[in-house]
Image (cartoon, rainbow, N blue to C red):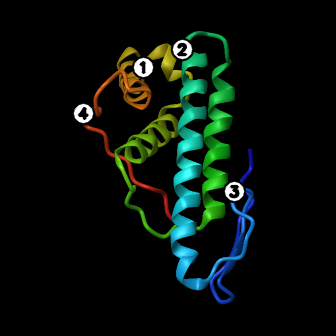
Amino acid sequence: MHLNLELNHEQGSFHSPYFTKNKKTSNTQRVYNMIIEQFINNKITQTIYYIQAVINHSLHPTELDQFILNTMDEWTLLKVQDETPSNARERVFWHVIHEMSLHGAHSLKDDLYFKSEITTCVDFFTGTGSYPLDCIGWRPIA
């Protein structure tokens, strides 16, 4: 999924697959934040699926690596300038994305510590676990 977003601050309008009506300038930031939140929530759901599929050997690790790259590409389209995640789920999401970018999906098979760390994050997303220790997740900024 590629995010198609056009935001025009001067005219106070924007276009996105999530919202299609023009908004007043005073509402632009609120709507923009809603788009970011929806993006993160959708990507969390997809991330859970991809990670679990790699761990269960039903998906090749390169597919997860490509998903991570695509997610980062889509994020850049939002042109976010605030690096602070809006909530704990987003913070854990960015932690997972950065860790997967750094180590690669093959590490879920090769590195038991890494697999445990990522599984703890997935458990947090699904509500079966608590907030992961040593979780440092920041938004990438353009």
Question: Which residue was labeled with disc 3?
Answer: 18
Q: Where is residue 125 in the image (x, y as percent from the top left)?
A: 43, 31
- The mark found on residue 55 in the picture is 2
- Mark 1 vs mark 4, CA separation in Å: 14 Å
Question: Which residue was labeled with disc 1?
Answer: 115
Mark nearer the N terminus (3 vs 2): 3
Three-letter amino acid code of the residue under disc 2: Ile
SS at circle 4 = loop
Are the residues flagged by discs 1 and 2 in contact, CB closer than 8 Å?
A: yes
Image quadrant assignment for residue 9 = bottom right
Of badges 1 and 4, the one in the foreground is 4
Three-letter amino acid code of the residue under disc 4: Leu
Quarter holding the C terminus is bottom right
Q: Is residue 6 above or below residue 134?
A: below
Say whether residue 102 is left or right of residue 120: right
Of badges 3 and 2, the one in the foreground is 3
Mark nearer the N terminus (2 vs 4): 2
How many marks the image carries: the answer is: 4
Question: Which residue was labeled with disc 4?
Answer: 133
Are the residues flagged by discs 2 and 4 in contact, CB closer than 8 Å?
A: no
Q: In this view, does 57 lie above or below 14?
A: above
Say whether residue 40 is left or right of residue 119: right
- Mark 4 vs mark 3, CA separation in Å: 34 Å
Specify whether residue 142 is in view.
no
Mark nearer the N terminus (3 vs 1): 3
Mark nearer the N terminus (4 vs 3): 3
Three-letter amino acid code of the residue under disc 3: Tyr
Q: In this view, does 23 lie above or below 63?
A: below
Q: Position of residue 121 (x, y in %)?
A: 39, 29
- Mark 3 vs mark 2, CA separation in Å: 31 Å
